[in-house]
Amino acid sequence: MTTADRDRASARDHALAVLRIRGAVFAVALLPAAVAVVLWTGSATGRFDAAWDGPRWAVTALAVLVLGVTAVLTALVATARPSVPPSVPLAEQDAPDLYRMIRDLADRLDVPEPSAIALTPDCDSWLEDEGARTPTLVIGSPFLWWMRVAELRALLAPVVAGTGPAVHPDIAAARRIVRALDAASRRPSVRVPARLLLRPTGPHAAEMERLVATACSIRAQTVDMGVRQVAQEQVGLAFAGWDRLLTRVAVPAWRMGRWPAQLDVGVVAALTELSRRDRLAEGFTARLGERPACDLLETPGEVDRAVSLLAARLFYGAPQSPDPHWQPIDWSAYPEEVVDRSWRAAAARLFAALDTTQSFQEEHGESARSGTGPQEVGRPTLSRILERLTGEEQRAALAARVSAAAVREERGSPASEPGGALVPGGPGEAAPIGLPPAPVKSGREVLSEHITAAVCCAAVDAGGARPGLDWLDGHVLLVDGERRQDLAEPVLALAEQGDPLPLRGWLASAGVRPDKPVRLV
């Protein structure tokens, strides 16, 4: 017996243990009824005299109560539906080559082929059990676009190998029991009994799944062994690039009611750029000459669009139905529609907070110390920012107002309405599903971001710069076609130390006049 055979046999043993626990629970539930039957039979045959009437009725009442409770609990557990991650179904006519590859892979592994294929906007792949003998293969769309055909086949081999255990009667029954109990444990009416049953079955289920995974991995070693290591390296790279693309490129667009309609195309660009920058990934770009796995789709553009919309709904909370506030956007329009608009929104927020802070200080007789007069309130120029932020108190007050305004606006965006996820970014805000929590930013960090946005708007208005998109870093400022990366230090000098000289020097080198009004819309 091979190691894989022993693991499969051990997995079946743990599955039987789960089934035995279920049987023992039902046996205990039926025990009062069995005793009641014995007492009634004994009374009918004359073996028990009238002295047994009291116990007989008491046991009968207990049996009825236990059977009633058991029936109700069984019905509630049976109707509890485990949460199924949403995915985009992929019909065979839309991806005949992909279905053919999976079918061939199943034949080589000597396991049943998956009943269907679906895509998920995440870096993961799994089998979704939908009943006896009907597992669906769910593939992470970033893998499909980034990986080559041979790499994808090697990556999916262990997953496809799992169709064998998935259709085994004992393992399938044990999985259904554990999943139903897990789903029922979230329902208040049956939370306690479901969790009591999960305690003895949980360890057996976990060990069963571990052994199944080990057996599938061993079985898959016979397929594409030479490509397996390269495929695993690409998984780590895909995770890194996908995370950067979502958090730094997709989330800003989602916040503005735009959802990039080609996220998977974007992840290819992001991962290519990551490969170029990361010395550990040198040589990976040579793979790009091989056939990409997305060529296995008949209409990759339409599939990418469907997956991109699902990503907006899954990770951010976009409306389920068509909504005029949510519109698709192509990558070519991203700099103008997202980068420039987000800069101007942040600049407008900064100048509004500056007006409020200045008016408050003037009401309290502090205008003389600020160095500006009331007539400048409402005039959006960089000169006001350079002059008003020289004092520590002014910077602290402005940072607090800008941070509060940003949180209020994010809470009022379309994605924070009923039915949508809470928008990330504010202190204590809930993160989108599947994305890492947004770091909590200090007031000075938020102030620096808003000053940067205002400076970028002024540079664009001056005519020598334009908004740009970096696949890994998000918003960038392009001056004469080159990315300008020297703005951070002058802005920090002003936001943290109140020193306007470095930023004045930067503006002079970029040909930006501080006294010119900044366009906010």
Image: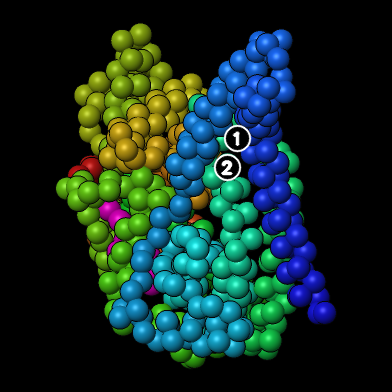
Q: Is residue 19 above or below residue 100?
A: above
Residue at 21%, 24% (x, y): give it. 375
Q: Is residue 150 left or right of residue 380?
A: right
Residue under circle 2? 182
30 within the magenta span: no
Observer-nearest residue: 413 or 509? 413
Residue at 69%, 66% (x, y): give it. 212
- Mark 2 in CB contact with mark 1 (< 8 angstroms): yes
Residue at 41%, 55% (x, y): give it. 86
Q: Is residue 73 left or right of residue 116?
A: right
Q: Could you tell which of marks 2 and 1 lies nearer the N-terminus?
A: 2
Q: Which residues are magenta?
A: 258-268
- What distance separates the C-alpha of mark 2 from that of mark 1? 7 Å
Q: Is residue 222 above or below residue 380?
A: below
Percent position (x, y) of residue 515? 27, 42
Amino acid, disc 1: Ala
Residue under circle 1? 194
Percent position (x, y) of residue 488? 50, 50
Place residue 419 in its image quadrant: top left
